[in-house]
Image (cartoon, rainbow, N blue to C red):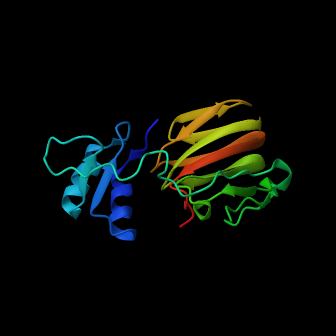
Amino acid sequence: MGQFFTGADIRRLAREEDCRHLLLAPDDRITSEAMDIARSLGVRIHREGDLSDGQSLPPLISRHTRSKSTVTLVKADSVRLKPFAVDVGRPEMDIQLADVITGAHGSPMAAGFMTWKKGSFPWALDYDEIDFVVDGQLEIRMGSQVVIGNPGDVIHIPRGSDIFFGSPSFAKVFYVTFPADWTT
């Protein structure tokens, strides 16, 4: 499966890496918004093997050698939950968190574990989040919609959502966020 490029990815590449050309593998995908942003920022989009515009870049690297990162293993016994650094005004919930994968690992996504006791707290997401319910029940309220996840269930919360995270008893979730640096 290829990579997926959004407008935010193009802005980041143009800003942080001074990218003027982006070479897509045949199975990479890019949003139409990202194409428009690339045009406005002067970033040329090329696809490996596509010679239709007469100016395509040659395939400089194979998709198997793109990443200079290594595989990261986080051992279960190394995960130490710590008090959530954000005060949500609900100390009785004993909210605990451990980020296990972050941008420091070279990942565009972050992942971690979070637990809390009975209760709920408001949260605004400026990132996408996927939660896997490990134990207990995870309740997400967004407007009039209420979703309750049980162990093994997966919940996607889209960027821009104003929600309440909660549980009628206890929740332990494994989460993945995009982008990785969701706290900044």
Is 47 situated above or below 151?
A: below
- How many dots with numbers? 0
Residue 96: percent from left, percent from top: 77, 56
Residue at the spot 70% in from the left edge and 62% down from the top edge:
89
Residue 29: percent from left, percent from top: 35, 40
Q: Nearer the viewer, residue 51 or 174?
A: 51
Residue at the spot 68% in from the left edge and 66% down from the top edge:
87
In this image, 159 relative to 40: left or right?
Answer: right
Residue at the spot 27% in from the left edge and 59% down from the top edge:
21
Residue at the spot 38% in from the left edge and 56% down from the top edge:
9
In this image, 115 relative to 181: left or right?
Answer: right
Is 3 situated above or below 122?
A: above
Residue 145: percent from left, percent from top: 53, 34
Q: Nearer the viewer, residue 20 or 169?
A: 20
Is 20 situated above or below 176?
A: below
Which quadrant of the view contains residue 139? top right
Residue 67: percent from left, percent from top: 51, 54
